[in-house]
Image (spheres, rainbow, N blue to C red):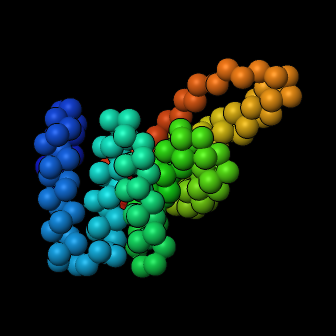
Amino acid sequence: MHLGTLREATHNLAEAERLYQAALTIYEHAYGSDHPDVAWCLDYLGGLRMQRSELPAARDMFQRAAEILATVEHSPMLQMSVLSNLAVVLHLQGSQTKAGQTYRKALKICRKFFGKEHPTTLMLERNLTQLDETRQAKRRDIQSGQTTPRRVIVQPTYLPINGQAM
């Protein structure tokens, strides 16, 4: 995994993906498909796919990781990372209701473990505020007959954590 993060940091995304995928295969073989380390690998792979704008693939990775973490003992920080990244993808894909619910779950964990003034907490709050503003703007556009789509800009969390606070 750590070699993958080094490759990703140097923008060698193909090699990073190969290393993340190898780690995922090893963890699934060693621990089974529902282990927190599998979710950790999926969070990294989802982040990589998000960087490549492969949003459906990123969503699948984050969703699977979230499902794993919902059923096993795990690090709250890993769960926050997975949920916040999933929320960003949902937001970018226009699934506003699900994105809002997922941002709120991530934000609750983030506030508890990082506090209200932590940069990640503030970033999640900005993303949630933007989501709410986008919803309101869409309502106004519909009422006024405007059909031009609005551009969505959100900041991904994608924290390179291994289930522990940085």
- The image quadrant where one finds the N terminus is bottom left
Residue drawn at x 30%, y 43% is 48
**Residue sitting farthest toward the right:** 143
Q: In the figure, residue 40 lies in which quadrant? A: bottom left
Please state the horizontal and vertical placement of residue 111, each as a whole percent of the image.
59, 56
- Image quadrant of residue 24? bottom left
Q: Quadrant of residue 65?
A: bottom left
Q: Residue at x 17, y 61 (%)?
A: 23
Horizontal side, residue 92 vs residue 16: left or right:
right
Front residue of 64/153: it is 64
Residue 111 in view here = no
Q: Is residue 42 left or right of residue 131?
A: left
Q: Is residue 35 left or right of residue 103?
A: left
The correct choice, above or below, for 5 with respect to 136 in the image is below
Q: Is residue 101 left or right of residue 66?
A: right
Q: Position of residue 3 (x, y in %)?
A: 13, 49
Q: Count numbered badges in the picture.
A: 0
Q: Position of residue 151 (x, y in %)?
A: 59, 25
User: Which is more toward the observer, 104 or 113?
Assistant: 104
The structure residue drawn at horizontal position 78% and vertical position 26%, both measured from the top left corner, is 141
Residue under the point 53% across and 34% down: 154
Instruction: Please say whether residue 147 is visible from this viewpoint.
Output: yes
Residue 44, horizontal then vertical, whole percent: 30, 52
